[in-house]
Amino acid sequence: MSEPRQIGAVRADAEAQQKTATAVAAPAYVPACPGAGKTHVITSRHLQSPRRLLRQGRALISFTRVARDQMARRCRQAGRADLVQAPHFIGTLDSFLWEFLVKPRRAAEPVPRLLESWASIKAPVEGVDREISLHRFPMALDPSQDPARESVVWDKLDYDTRQLIEASAYSRPAWQEKIFATRKSWCEQGYFTGHEARVLALWNLRNADASARLLAPLRSRFSEVVVDEAQDCSAADLAILQLLHDAGLPLVLVGDPDQAIYAWRGAEPQALGAFAARLSPTPHRLTGNWRSSPVICRLAATLRTGQRPPDTSVVRNDDIPVLLLPTRFAASGSRHLHAPTGDGIVDAFRVLAEEYAIEAKDCLVTAYKYATLPGITREKPNTNAITSLAWARTVVHTPGASGDDLTRACAIAVRVLFGYWYPGETSGPDRIMAAHRLSAGQVNRTAFAFLHSLPAPHKEWGTQVWQAMKAWPLLPGAAPQGGKGRPAGKPTVPRPQPATGIRTNIVHQLKGDEADGVLLLLPDPGSVQRWATSDPATDEVLRIWYVAVTRARRLAAIALPEEETDALAQLLTGRQVPIRVA
């Protein structure tokens, strides 16, 4: 068979799988490989809805606003703006739980608000011997008990927070008591995050009276609920979905268990598999990869469960081998050197990518931890306002800064400016905006413009910041009172790394992202032994690496300690993965 006919046959098979998944009746489970076109399948399913006015609609649920917006945009581009309006729903899981399972049972006053995280407001834990913000404490929810049991996930604290806790005179149980007391006081003011939404949704669904009042409108409104990226469902999410399924709400789950990388929240492949088996004993698999080359599909297959054959590359015939880069990793910081040349590892990767006609702007560098990545120093928790503002100013002046960092930088500037402009306000920025009828766009533009106007941070920078704050045009309702809200102290100045023109981000921030070339940094000794012997079903680190390499379209590269390069070369060659040690 000629190559064009082979590619045509592969495409036809992949399209047939998509059509089957588009038409399958609920309840159903659709496991989908990376690059399988999940969003296309889900949107195509939604676009089949008749144009006539419906009494019932469909809910499309994702875990990110990016995926939500992408599905809504595709509906509008297809001329079906009606599909993003009631009775349909397109949104995140947090917003779905909030709108249909929590908010209807909340009192009208104080006005209940769903926060993206506790970082959206200034919420220090009260009654302890040092100030640590509430958002620094990750919380887990065990739904196996009724009521569901909550706890602080102590082993997921960042380094600085852990150091502060260890130096505190208060024990961890005492801290946990104060953490939950602080959280309760904010909830009583009407503030909740997605975690609290899950707690309340579970309670409501397990309470007979509340459940009856909530489920009847849901069954009446939705003929189907589609959950995208189902592998990200926590134990609490699956418990909620099980209750909705038991109540007769038709569910369709779409996801890839091999990409489950949120174990600390209770997202485990086995839990999803067990729930999916109860939901639909016959899964409808999508194994055609519309993103990655055959070589990358082979590489990915070495990092997933069950030793299944590689997925089928649908649209690419690139034969670029996997690059293995012997690297001398810095003990601290991110100045990692390519061992053969002595160049920085990112610069070496850029030169190698150019050999395959891949430009720097089409490349991505990733790692498990922020500390491994090149780029500007991360903002440290519990720093003073002037240091946080210095970090934010550095971010907006750094080419290629991530969207996540830019969002955080904007939030920091808003908090600083609002602290000066609205000194009498004790609530968060969202309520200040609502009280003074300020739009989010107006506030964000002001914050970014202010950051851009500031000079580069230095030790005496605080005086210049204060002068800029006093001179900046006020927003409506602003009423400064002397020096209230002035950022105090001297900033710890963040030091940016030289710009490389290549995007960088940790793996957990790359869901839904892709690039022609991807470099994964593996600095830890023993990584090759882990790759060879661990089971991805139980080792989340392997699943994180799997997510990283499957972001690549044409070229995947791995930087690892130079003494382990030969071992990985042998491992991959033995599994028929073409490699090049560079």
Image (cartoon, rainbow, N blue to C red):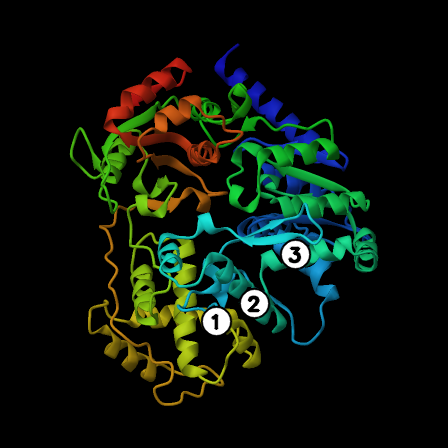
Observer able to see residue 446: no
Residue 515, by quadrant, is top left
Q: Which disc, if any, is residue 33?
A: none
Per the model, the C-alpha gap separating discs 3 and 1 is: 24 Å
Q: Position of residue 500 (x, y in %)?
A: 26, 46
Say which residue label 2 marks.
Answer: 181
Could you say whether the residue bearing mark 2 is in a helix, strand or loop? helix
The reply, left or right, for residue 448 in relation to residue 86 is left
Per the model, the C-alpha gap separating discs 2 and 1 is: 9 Å
Residue sitting at x 37%, y 18%: 571
**Residue that extends furthest to the left in the rendered view of this protein:** 342
Residue sitting at x 34%, y 64%: 392
Q: Position of residue 404 (x, y in %)?
A: 42, 55
Say which residue label 3 marks.
Answer: 199
Q: Would you call the spot at circle 1 few (<14 residues within 10 Å), some (14-19), or many (20 or more)?
A: some
Say which residue label 1 marks.
Answer: 127
Residue sitting at x 50%, y 62%: 174
Taking depth in this image into account, of 121 and 80 the one nearest to the observer is 121
The answer to whether mark 2 and mark 1 are in CB contact below 8 A is yes
* Quadrant assignment for the C terminus: top left
Taking depth in this image into account, of 35 and 542 the one nearest to the observer is 542
Residue type highlighted by circle 3: Val
Residue type highlighted by circle 2: Ala
Q: Position of residue 393 (x, y in %)?
A: 31, 65
Q: Earlier in the sequence, mark 3 or mark 2?
A: 2
Report the mark closest to the observer, 3 or 1. Answer: 1
Per the model, the C-alpha gap separating discs 3 and 2 is: 16 Å
Residue type highlighted by circle 1: Gly
Could you say whether the residue bearing mark 1 is in a helix, strand or loop? loop
Q: Position of residue 20 (x, y in %)?
A: 70, 29
Q: Earlier in the sequence, mark 2 or mark 1?
A: 1
